[in-house]
Amino acid sequence: MKYKKFFIIMFILILCSSISALLAPIFIQLWKANGTSLDTKKIVFIVLLILASKVLTILFTIFREKFAKEYNKGNFISYIKNIFNMNYDSIIEKGAMNLLERASISVNSIYSFMMSGYIQIFSSLLVAIVCLILIANVNLYLALIMFLALPINYFGYKLLNKKLKKKSEEMQKSTGMGFQEILSYVQEVDYVKQLSDRSVIYNKLEPATEKVYGSMARVNEYAQSMTVVLEGINEIIKTLLLLIVVYDYMANSSSIYSIILVTLIFPLYFANVSTITNSNIEKRNFDIAKDFEKELIANKEADGSEAIDMINDIELDISSINIKDMKLDFNANAKLKKGDIVRINGANGSGKSTFAKGLVKFRDVKIIKVNGIDIDKCKNEDIRDRIEYVVQNAPIVNGSLRKNLLLDFDDGSHIDLTQNQFIRSILEKKSLDDEILIGGTNLSGGEKQKISFARSLLKNPDVLVLDEICSNIDKESTKEIYDYLNKTRDERICFIISHDDLTSGLINVNINA
């Protein structure tokens, strides 16, 4: 286990904290057994023991939370990796926002169980057992009643959690899908802001908000109602115990130590019973998180084993394209080499973008061969390293122009961005340190696409796939991109999907879908 040392330290700290919490009632039991009278020193000693126990609990909390950041970051990145390792259509079908929302919930669930339920249940059992032994020395019937509280709580919450698991799984899916629907409206800021009457949009958000908060309400209604019942049983048991102790003290003139002992033991015992039963809830959420992880892995995309260092040629022998249950006629027969610039022609919905996605193994398109090897047999990583797929909606992040250009690099300090002619043209109007807002809201469409195109050039790809990248930008930017492609055509194979009139002499291969 990666964090084995940490969990061992955590267990020791929790054990020390639990033992320190037991010291006060243990000393009281010893004084009672020895017939020692209670005085000021003993009271101060007991108070100091309780304070020491609380200090240890605080130290445990601080230590745990300092570690939590790295632990949660590691788990979150693991989920993100599994999401992006899914096959393309599963990501689209389930929704990226939905998957992200579920990943976030899962990370919190794993942390809660591993930091609390998984570690604390053992120390809580120890404390509960010692509490029962101490109370048994005072009154055996009290100990038996207290013991009954343990199975009532454990099996009661277990039954609750069995039903809650299903409801929570439904809630997790519903909230993810609901937030994704809400985001689809909220991110269209320009459109929503220009509406004179936004009540139509608010009404359209109603079903999505119902998915989110309706599912939450159903889970909370059931969980809280059942919890009130179980907590009510605990309150009845505690009240009964206190009545027995007070009656015994008044009727039999029992030792004052018994009253003090019970006063300390009852809250300590029931707090640890609560920890034991709550571990059931945390285990339920942990299981849901692990089931989600299995779901991601089950939808992992297929990969090949053939390594590709460089792409010299691409061979196409395609007669149709399958998109789930739909089959499209798509005829593409060509053997392409560097210097070829290929235009993919066809009506909307004819499969052009699916073909483009097949070139980077997002979708399974047969038959595509790379250097004479079936693309299915090639490693995904190698294909995507040598083929750059540039889409219509340019990915732009919040940060500097430099950060956006070097998005594909961990450390781009070794790259001289001014060496590329196309990037130099961007720097005529902007500096590398210019700040770009989220989504590139302070950029024109042409600037966004030029940044995306320039980014694709930095890896010196063997193949460029341009999917409608110039459909919504100005003619000047379009001409600049196509002129650069023509000038550097011998460096790569290029596929262009576009409805635009292209520069004369640019295209030398046409594929009519």
Image (tube, grey):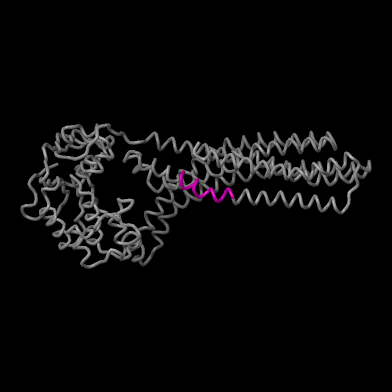
2 or 196, which lies in front?
2
In which quarter of the view is residue 235 placed? top right
- Quarter residue 135 falls in: top right
Q: Which of 235 and 439 is in front in this view?
A: 439
Residue depicted at x 45% and y 38%:
292
Residue 276: x %, y % from top left: 65, 38
In the rendered image, residue 127 lying in the magenta stretch gets the answer no
Query: What residue is rendered at 40% in x and 35% in y?
Result: 297
Q: Is residue 17 left or right of residue 30?
A: left
Q: In this view, does 438 lie to the left or right of 509?
A: right
| Relative to 429, 119 lies left or right | right
Query: How far from the left and from the top, in percent, is residue 338?
Result: 12, 44
Please name the predominant secondary structure of the magenta segment in the image. helix
Camera-nearest residue between 101 and 253: 253
Give the extent of the magenta segment: 63-75
The residue that appears at 45% across and 43% down in the rendered structure is: 173
Residue 366 to residue 58: above or below: above
Tell me how many marks there are: 0
Who is closer to the viewer here, 277 or 200?
277
> Image quadrant for the C terminus?
top left
Image quadrant in which you'd find residue 246? top right
Q: Does the magenta stretch include residue 64?
A: yes
Expressed as whole percent of the image width and height from the top left, the position of residue 345 reads 13, 46
Q: Residue furthest front?
A: 414
Q: Position of residue 82 (x, y in %)?
A: 39, 40
